[in-house]
Amino acid sequence: MPELGLEVALYLGRAGAQSAQLGAVVAILRKIANLLRPFRWAFVFLAGAVTVVFLFWLRTSHFSFEPVQYVFLSLFGSLLILTFAANALVRFRGTHDRISLILALGFALAALIEAGGNYDFYTAMISGAAMPSRVPLPWMVSCTLLGALLILALIVERHMPSSREPGREIAIACFVVGGVGYLTGAAFLGLPWQISIHPNWFLSRPWEMLPAALFVAAALGFRSRLRRTASAFDKSLYWTACINIVCHLVASQSENLMDGPGMLARLLKVASYGVLLGGALVDNARLFDQVRRMAVTDSLTGLANYRTLVNAIQSELDRSKRSGRPFAIVLFDLDGLKLVNDKYGHLVGTRAICRLANVLKMHCRSTDTGARYGGDEFALVLPEASGEAAERVSKRVREKLASDLEIPLLTVSAGVSVYPADGDTLEKLLAAADRALYKMKGHTDGMQSLMRIAVCL
């Protein structure tokens, strides 16, 4: 056992040293970032120049890829988008955020359009015919649709940020997204010319500038929105728009769907979908964790709520019945909270409740459970604690609260019950602690005067 304790201590020491080293590295990186911040536009210009040179080299390098790789990337991107759509719908049901709803339906429609656009490639691969030489119409429709929907989502969020009737909103959003998709497809189908590739032009695929312009507008809008909200979902929307801008700039240099720029554009498109899905997953995890915390904690004090308190007591009962070890419950009740509310106002009364909750947080062990039992009543569950230990905790909490010089001065009454001496069920233990608390309440006035005199001295 001593050797095990020594090994644990050495492990903790190494872990602490590694954490300190990591913190130092992070601090150094932050200092370097702050030093380089004034030169960020120079770095942006340099990155742009390097990108132009890279694109020129990629265009003249004559790389060629297999059609199956193009189809695989397209299908993989469609799968990512459909997964994002499902997560965005979950987010909408939880937050009633219209941006999530519009993007979920719009991206799902775009994924289906893009996946269906691979039919020409399937036919050519099966029959051995030549691959299509012009820009696939589904690619242009889906990309333009995504850019338009990002802008539409920003407009809707600005004027109608949240939904009141989710079922009705979903039906309306389906109609709007379907209408935008139909108009986008009809606009491209109605063109009097084909969307061809022009190898000798500076922009081989000039029509790529249309979705690029839409994504530029969307990126600027989401950049402005990040000043108000900066969740992982919002950040992923901004970076998705930025990656799509680069994607279509790269695609404009493609002379063949299977050449280097064409495949790089496809990779960037899939990468943007991955970023979007990652942001939605991270933000959904944050929302689920927030809901979980709200389900087990009191929103005002941050302590456990009544339901969590009952579960903690029941768990200790089960454990103590197996081990035969005692545990204690301490109930606390603020003295004269009504007088505080009448004299100072309810905001000060609420602050008084939070002051007691903060004292309980500071004087709880990590294994203890502090909870709000009622309006101004609190409870502590002390595993493997005797009555004497519980009395010491009670005394320490009361002394700490009485020594707080914030106005108004506060005192608290407390009652202790111990398993199994005071009961072997949850109801009996709480009733015993409640009786002990109100027994102390009968002496509150005298105790409160003595404590305040002691504080003043």
Image (cartoon, rainbow, N blue to C red):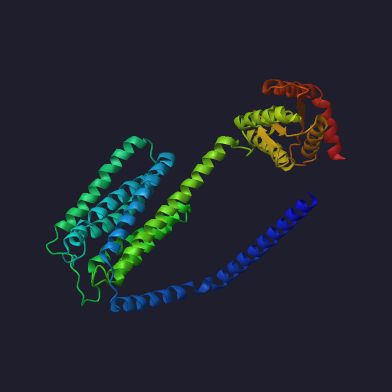
Which image quadrant: the C terminus?
Answer: top right
- Nearest the viewer among 371 and 162 is 371
Residue depicted at 23% across the width and 69% down the height: 206
Give the left or right position of residue 25, taking residue 140 as reference: right
- Nearest the viewer among 171 and 254 is 254
**Quarter location, residue 397:** top right
**Quarter location, residue 265:** bottom left
Residue depicted at 74% across the width and 24% down the height: 433
Can residue 356 be seen from the camera position used here?
yes
Up the image or down, 109 lies above or below 343; here it is below
Up the image or down, 445 lies above or below 95; here it is above
- Nearest the viewer among 92 and 17 is 17
Give the left or right position of residue 264, taking residue 444 as reference: left
Q: Picture coordinates of residue 394 (x, y %)?
A: 78, 33
Give the left or right position of residue 192, taking residue 286 as reference: left
Can residue 339 be seen from the camera position used here?
no
Q: Picture coordinates of residue 121 (x, y %)?
A: 21, 60
Q: How many marks?
A: 0
Q: Residue furthest right?
A: 457
Residue depicted at 55% across the width and 69% down the height: 33
Q: Picture coordinates of residue 49 (x, y %)?
A: 39, 77
- Nearest the viewer among 218 and 336 is 218
Up the image or down, 345 lies above or below 83; here it is above
**Quarter location, residue 331:** top right
Up the image or down, 216 lies above or below 435; here it is below
Q: Picture coordinates of residue 271 (x, y %)?
A: 38, 61
